[in-house]
Image (cartoon, rainbow, N blue to C red):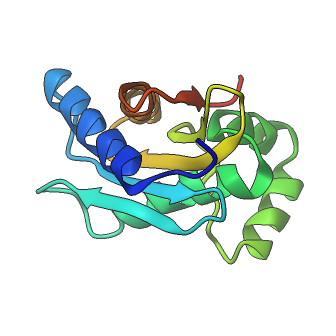
Amino acid sequence: MTTLTLDAAQTIVAAALKYAGEHKLNPLAIVVLDARGAYRALAAQDGTSLKRSDVAHGKAYGAIALGMGSRSLHKRAKEQAYFIAAVGQTLEGNLIPVPGGVLIRDAAGVLLGAVGISGDTSDNDEAAAMAGIAAASLKGDPGAD
């Protein structure tokens, strides 16, 4: 697979929502982007706040733009706050450097896109993203601490 299909994106969303329900997470917004940063799927559960999908987008878009999961971006924000602030300006505010933005890779490691989730704790958002990606038989790359 060299592109992120709509079917795969929809599987990621459905499985992430299933995970959220099974783990009693707060209402989530889920954004799936392809490797170019274009939308493939978006869902916002009943009860999410107004800008929750924008936060999910910023997690996914930032991961794609910098080529690392948002957990790594969070680490860089702690260590290089000025760099992350500058990149945030370059990306016109579309950078949320906290866990929950996970790169999507195929079996060979080729970047297909990213999923961003927001609504619960960052760790729970990331866990839901990883569950969704695994359900699509793809590899999630959340970054490292």
Observer able to see residue 69: yes
Q: Please state the horizontal and vertical placement of residue 25, each as a whole percent of the image.
A: 22, 32
Q: Is residue 141 above or below residue 31?
A: above
Q: Please state the horizontal and vertical placement of residue 49, each as a whole percent of the image.
A: 25, 62
Q: Is residue 82 left or right of residue 12?
A: right
Q: Please state the horizontal and vertical placement of residue 69, each as a whole percent of the image.
A: 66, 38
Q: Please state the horizontal and vertical placement of residue 60, each as a whole percent of the image.
A: 56, 53
Q: Is residue 72 above or below residue 60?
A: above
Asked whether 44 or 139 is in front, the reply is 139
Asked whether 53 or 75 is in front, the reply is 53
Q: Is residue 91 above or below residue 10?
A: below
Query: Where, quadrant-wise, is the N terminus in this rendering?
Result: top right
Observer able to see residue 118: no
Q: Is residue 13 left or right of residue 74?
A: left
At x 19%, y 31%, the residue is: 18
Query: Where, quadrant-wise, is the C terminus in this rendering?
Result: top right
At x 87%, y 45%, the residue is: 80
Q: Quadrant of residue 129?
A: top left
Q: Is residue 25 left or right of residue 95?
A: left
